[in-house]
Image (tube, helix red, strand yellow):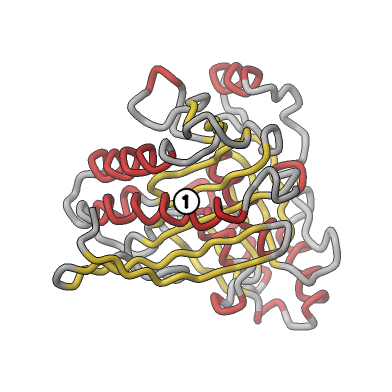
Amino acid sequence: MSDEILDRVLTLELVRVTERAAVAASYLVGRGNEKDADQAAVDAMRKELNQLDIDGEVVIGEGERDEAPMLFIGEKVGSGKGPKVDIALDPLEGTTLTAKGQADALTTIAMAEKGSLLNAPDVYMDKIAVGGGLPDGVVDLDKSIKENLANLSDAKNVSISDLLVCILDRPRHAEIINDVRNAGARIMLISDGDVSGVIASAQNETGVDLYVGSGGAPEGVLAAAALKCIGGQMQSRILINNSDEEKRAIKMGITDVSLVYKLDDLVSKDVIFSASGVTDGSLLNGVFFQEDRVFVETLVMRSNNGTVRRLKTEYKNFI
């Protein structure tokens, strides 16, 4: 995508959006109230988005219009004077983590040219992801865990016992966890935040080689946006468990739930991704207060030039 659509200035503008949301949520860290923490992040993110010169629409958000005041799917944001863009966001990934004061809570957003993000319904999605520099198709959603680990170990020229697999710690993943252990690989279980889990599979410093399991479809699109920027592979498939979820998928334009989505199906054009830490974690440091100053760490990336920036911002008299 050309700079005419996503101006370079918007990259730093998005940093401010996630930073504001992170600071707002940080005041609720450890307070035991998930709803209030989420609402604080939503309010801050909406306020900042509406100051941007964009004609934006939320395509991945926090539910339908009748669930306002969340940033709902279909909500218009921005001044309306700038480029037409799609926005995917999770104002607070890790509401429980924030409420409990635990690690790895983030605020995340992705912005792309209109029509280039998959309009994913709020249902579960099977996902498998690896980092960059590997043969295309090295992992496959339709292959067994054992096969995928064997192929990945061959591609990386390491033994399966050297591989580290990141999995969301949920009862529904008991079989996957058992299969990974039986294959001989190591496991990193995370309590929340599969966006950061997918990102971890493409970051050398995390040591994670593979992310696998089911999680929210909206989070899958956000994770794909990040992976498109830093390089990697991802496959996913929508999971439908009842007629209500089927209606939701059809409403979003998805009629074939057996379809496997690859990275470019989830995010088809240039995208900007920004995430700011709320609590300290493996990906980012959390918000830190010192006297009249606030410190925030942000990871911001853009796909068309592969730029990845890790910013440590210091604010004085943050308002």
Looking at the image, residue 52 lies above or below residue 139: above
Q: In which quarter of the image is residue 244?
A: top right
Closer to the camera in the image, 134 or 87? 87
226 vs 194, left or right, is right
Location of residue 304 (image quadrant): bottom right
In the rendered view, tell whether residue 96 sits above or below residue 306. above
Is 301 on the left or on the right of 149, as rendered? left
Q: In the visual, does 26 lie left or right of 46?
A: left
- Rendering coords of residue 294 (x, y %): 25, 66
What residue lies at 55% left-to-right and 69% top-to-bottom?
309
Residue 176 or residue 309, whichever sits in front: 309
Please rate how many residues cluster around mark 1, counting C-alpha atoms within 10 Å: few if below 14, some from 14 to 19, many from 20. Answer: many
Q: Residue type at mark 1?
A: Thr
Residue positioned 38% across, 51% down in the render? 94
Judging by the rendered image, the residue that carries numbered circle 1 is: 108
How many marks are shown on the rendered structure?
1
- The image position of residue 148, as x and y in percent, is 76, 62
Tell me: 12 left or right of 107. Answer: right
Observer-nearest of 12 and 289: 12
Counting from the top left corner in percent of width and height, residue 58 is at 52, 32
- The residue depicted at 82 percent of the width and 74 percent of the height is 155
Q: Is residue 288 visible?
A: yes
The kind of secondary structure element at disc 1 is strand
Residue lying at 40% horizontally and 56% vertically, measured from the top left: 106
Viewer-proximal residue among 185 and 39: 39
Residue 123 in view, yes or no: no
